[in-house]
Amino acid sequence: MTGKVWVDGDRQRVQSMMFDEVVISLVHRDTDTVYLYTVGEDVALALDYTPELAGSTEVFHALNPAFDGRETISGETALRFSIDGQRDAARITGNIWLSPDGILLRAETESELGGEIVQGLMEVSDIQRGSIDSTLFELPEGMSIERR
C-alpha cells in the first residue's frame, strides 16, 4: 500500500492506493468524525472518530514508548522510541520514529495476535511543509454520507 498524508491542525487526509483503487480518509477531530470513500464513488462512510482511526497520540502512549535516541529519517530529525504494549487483542513491539513536531516518520513493528506473528514496516519518503488547500479536507461536492 502506498499513500499520501496531509495534516492541518485538527484535520487530516490520508490518500491510499489499495487494490487498484484510491481510498480517501478525512479525519475531522473538531467534529469527531472520520469520512471514508473511494475515488469515483458517490457515497462516503461517516464514522465516529476514535484515536485508532487517526493514529493519535493516545494510541502511541498505550504502547509504552521509551525514548532511545535521535536519528535522521528521510532527511528529518527523528526521535526513536521502542514500544511494547497492548492494543485491542494484539501485543505490539518494535520501534517508531517521530519528528519533533509529531509526524510518524518510520515504524518497525511486530504484532502477536492469536499466536500468529505479523511484521510491519512503514516509512515516510517525502515530507513537504507549507500551506495546504483547505478543500483537501472536505468531501467532494455531491457526495452522499452514510453514517455508521
Image (spheres, rainbow, N blue to C red):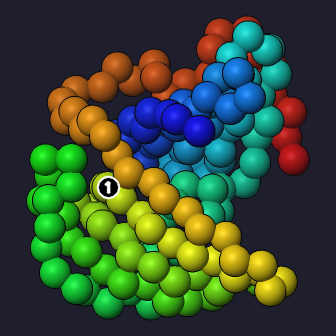
Total numbered badges shown on the rendered structure: 1
Task: Kindly identify the residue that appears in the image at 13 percent across and 73 percent down.
Answer: 70
Closer to the camera, 141 or 88? 88
Left or right: where 73 falls relative to 93 = left
Task: Kindly identify the residue that appears in the image at 51 percent across and 49 percent down.
Answer: 30
Residue 17 image position (x, y, % from top left): 61, 28
Left or right: where 78 falls relative to 106 = left
The part of the image, by quadrant, that contains residue 107 is bottom left
Closer to the camera, 71 or 26? 71
| Badge 1: residue crowd in 10 Å (few <14, some 14–19, many ≥20) | many
Task: Kindly identify the residue that appears in the image at 46 percent across and 23 percent down.
Answer: 136
Image quarter (top left, top right, bottom left or bottom right) of the N terminus? top right
The part of the image, by quadrant, that contains residue 8 is top left
> Would you say residue 144 is visible in this rendering?
yes
Residue 13 image position (x, y, % from top left): 50, 36
Amino acid under disc 1: Leu
Callout 1: SS:
strand
Left or right: where 130 falls relative to 63 = left
Q: Give the residue at mark 1.
A: 105
> Would you say residue 63 is visible in this rendering?
no
Residue 145 image position (x, y, % from top left): 80, 28
Above or below, 30 relative to 87: above
Above or below, 141 relative to 62: above
Left or right: where 121 falls relative to 31 = left
Task: Kindly identify the residue that appears in the image at 54 percent across and 31 percent down.
Answer: 15
Above or below, 108 relative to 101: below
Above or below, 85 relative to 33: below
The part of the image, by quadrant, that contains residue 66 is bottom left
